[in-house]
Amino acid sequence: MWGIVARVTRQAVHNIPLILMAWGFAFSIFLYGVLVGNLHWYPFDPLWDAMRTMKIAWEKLESRDRVRAVGLPSDVLPADVSRNRIIVEHPVDDSASFLLTGGEGQFLDYCPDHGCAAVAFNRDGGMVHAFPYRPEELQAKRTVDLPYGEILHDDARDTSIIGLSSLSNGDLIAVYDLTGTTPYGGGVARLDQNGHIVWYRRDYSDHWPKVTPDDKILVISHRIGPQRVRVSEARDGRGVTLVCPRGVLLDLVRVLDMEGRVTEEIPVFDAVFASPYQTRLRSTVDPAAGEIARCDPTHTNSVVPVGSELAAKFNDVKADDLLVSMRNISALGIIGRTDHKLKHLFTGTFIFQHSAQVARDGRIVLFDNFGASEKAGPSRVLMYDPLTGKEQTVFPNAHTPRNLATFSRFYGNIDISQDGTRALVIVALAGKGYEIGLPGGEILTTFNNLHDVHTLAQFGGETSKVRYFTEYGVYYLPSHLTN
């Protein structure tokens, strides 16, 4: 007995180096796995890309009949959809008409093939004009076609219209967003009044376009930069490196003419990088996705001309300079149109904001997705004075009905009326929009992005035949386009 124990003990002692080596090797693998998972060491990125690719492919293979942007079911009956899309809460003494964003499966009552790309309605909910959605033309009308990483892409079901802007002749500028592509973003097109595509640039354009008074088209996009971008502390040289194997996305604003040709490029990322505010590009946690935004450091989501009212507040700003909203650094900026320098950077209590617009008194109205306030909740419409930094929560407020849908993790477009007294505010994921008074925030009109989906294959077995769709934008139409 004791001999057996002694022999086993001698053998174990003899094998201690081997045991320790095996244990050390196993611990090293475990430790490296922790570092890969927590610090994103190699091979985190290729593994993450492979898992993402498999997930996208699986979802598309399982849901070939699914239409993007479909939201929650509604108890509204199909026969009552049209009368519930626009609800007047308080009468407004004007003849305004509204342009509502559409897409695949939306407004099938007016455009039965694929749905409408957009529909214009008067204030009473009467249809003024419908632009049929024509995804079959996206391939044939491409004038620019930058490379994308994409899997099983279908122009009908994987392409959504996210932004619109009206031209003086009634045509539309439309920005498309693509599902399951790398990089994100889609392209920009001109649609004629019958919804036909005049030209289409598949060039990573994203968010909302803006047509200037001199008929220039401002559209946000990005170029694919290097895999590593070093962001330093200005004084001691210390900092962090943004690492993205697919290339860091470097935002820019393109200026197009009416034929879709590029006349200018204003680099947003480069302007911030070259400014004293470079350290704001350090990676931050995206509260919407819950992960580090390393590949998309600025995520510019709106651009508008500064205008004379805002320019008058600063000695170094011109009316044709650009006001941009940069979501991932929770900041607004004014970039020179000619020198491309970041002239001013504005921050406040707003977090991951969208759609910064200039009000008639030179203040800025924006959709603050995560900034929150005691009365408003997570998302709010904020009036911001860039000169003093003073903030005013416009909507929701103490007079807003409780339990109203106002929170949106993503998007949140704003359009200000021509006289500056009202604004259209979009709560995208809820499929809702509100026309509010400025600056009081009272609700004047409610927009419900409701659609009868009984003809869509994915809803064949459902009792409810009416669904909310994501609402990407509602816009005031110039009066000459509806008279």
Image (cartoon, grey):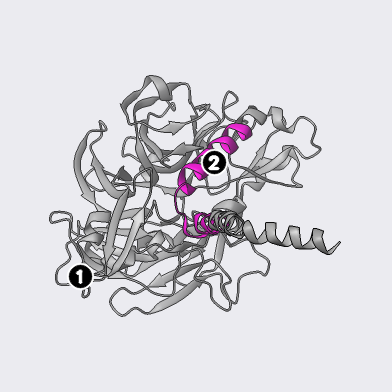
Residue sitting nearer the eye, 30 or 205: 30
Residue placed under numbered mark 2 in the picture: 52
Q: Position of residue 150 (x, y in %)?
A: 47, 31
Say above or below: 129 vs 428: above
In the image, residue 235 lies at what x, y percent? 21, 75
**Which amino acid, by three-letter code, is at mark 1?**
Ala
Q: SS at mark 2? A: helix
Q: Is tag 1's residue or tag 2's residue first in the polypeptide sequence?
A: 2
Mark linked to residue 417: none
Q: Secondary structure at mark 1?
A: loop
Magenta stretch: includes residue 367:
no
In magenta, the rendered stretch is 30-59
Prevailing SS of the magenta stretch: helix
Q: Is residue 47 magenta?
A: yes
Using a 10 Å C-alpha cutoff, classify the residue at mark 1 as few (fewer than 14 neighbours), some (14 to 19) or many (20 or more). Answer: some
Query: Is residue 320 visible in the rendered structure shown here?
Result: yes
Establish if 268 lies above or below 179.
below
Q: Could you say which is closer to the camera, residue 364 or residue 446? A: 364
Q: In the image, 53: left or right of 230?
A: right
**Residue at 31% of width from left, 52% of height from top?**
228
- Residue under circle 1? 312
- Quarter of the rendering containing residue 442: bottom right
**Residue 133, image x, y percentages:** 50, 29
The quadrant the C terminus occupies is top left
Seen in the picture, residue 129 relative to 448 is either above or below; the reply is: above
Q: Residue furthest right?
A: 1
Mark 2, other Cα within 10 Å: few <14 / some 14–19 / many ≥20: few
Residue lying at 39% horizontally and 62% vertically, measured from the top left = 283
Query: Callout 2, which amino acid?
Result: Arg
